[in-house]
Amino acid sequence: MAQLAAKEQVAHGDILTAEFQSKGKGQRGNTWMSEKGKNLLFSIYLKPSFLKVKDIFLLNIIAGLAGTQLINQIIPGAECELKWPNDVYVNGKKISGILIETSISKQLDFVVAGIGFNVNQSHFALPTATSLKIETGKAYDLGGVLESYAEFFENYYIMLEQGQRSHILRLYHDRMMWRGETHTYRSNGSEFEAVLIGINESGNLVLNCNGASKQFRTKEVEFVS
C-alpha cells in the first residue's frame, strides 16, 4: 500500500486486503504466516493530520481496541487482552497482530496500519496462536468480519480525532495483558523481574523494578516468562 500511496493512488480510509501472506512483517523481525483465504490480512491507509509524530503509537492502540471489540461482539465473554506493543490475545492466545508504518517528511505524511487477524484457520505451527474458528468451532465470512472491524476502528479513530486521548489510554489499560502482574523481562541482555504498571503518555512500557519505575521503548525490552 505504501507504493500506492507514493503514487497517490489511495485515499484516506482506504483498505487493501490480501488473500495470502507468507512474509508479513512484525516486531523483532518476526513473520506473519497465514493459510490462503483463511484469515484477514489488510492495510488501512490514513492521513491523520491532527496527530503529532510522537503520538503515532495511538493508532496502534485503537487498532488493537477495535480488535478486542470485534472479538467480544463475536464471542461474548471472551477474555480479550492487548499485549504491548502490538498484539491482540483471546483466552490467552494470539489472534491478531498490528504493524504501523509511516511516511514522514517535514510532517506526518501518511500512515499504513497493517493488520493480520486469524479467522478461519484451524491449525497453526505455534501453540500460542488461535483463530475465531478455533475459539467457536464456526467458520466466518471474511468480508463481514472485516466490515465489522472497520466500523469499530473508525469509531475509535473519530474518538482520537476528537481529542479523547485520555479515554483511549484508559480503555487500553483496562485491556492490557499482565498489568499488575510480576513477570521476567530482558533488556540489554539482562533478565529481571518486574511488575507491569502500564504505558506512559508516550506509549512506552512502564515497569516497577524493585520499587523503582522504569520506562522502555519498543525493542528495548522483551517478555521472558
Image (cartoon, rainbow, N blue to C red):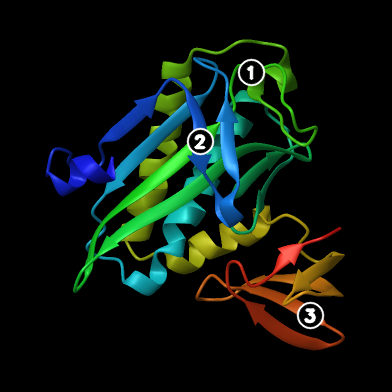
Residue in the foreground of this view, choosing between 216 and 173 = 216
Query: What residue sits right under mark 3 in the picture?
Result: 208
Local packing at callout 1 (Cα closer than 10 Å; few below 14, some 14-19, many 20+) is some
Secondary structure of the residue carrying tag 3 is strand
Earlier in the chain: of badge 1 and badge 2, it is: 2
**At label 3, which amino acid type do we have?**
Asn
The quarter of the image holding the C terminus is: bottom right
Residue 68 can be seen, yes or no: no
The residue at 77%/74% (across/down) is 189
Amino acid type indicated by mark 2: Lys
Q: What secondary structure is marked by label 2?
A: strand
Q: Position of residue 79 (x, y in %)?
A: 74, 39
| Disc with the residue nearer the chain's start (2 vs 3) | 2
In the picture of the structure, the residue carrying the numbered disc 2 is: 23
Quarter of image, res 186: bottom right
Residue 121 bears which disc, if any? 1
- Residue 197 visible (yes or no): yes
21 relative position to 125: left or right: left
Q: Earlier in the sequence, mark 1 or mark 3?
A: 1
Residue positioned 26% across, 58% down in the render? 48
Identify the residue at horizontal 86%, vertical 67% (top origin): 184
Asked if the residue under mark 2 is in contact with the one under mark 1, i.e. CB atoms within 8 Å, the reply is no
How far is disc 1 from disc 3 in space, using C-alphas? Answer: 38 Å
Mark 1 in CB contact with mark 3 (< 8 angstroms): no
Image quadrant holding the N terminus, namely top left
Residue at position x 54%, y 39% from top? 67
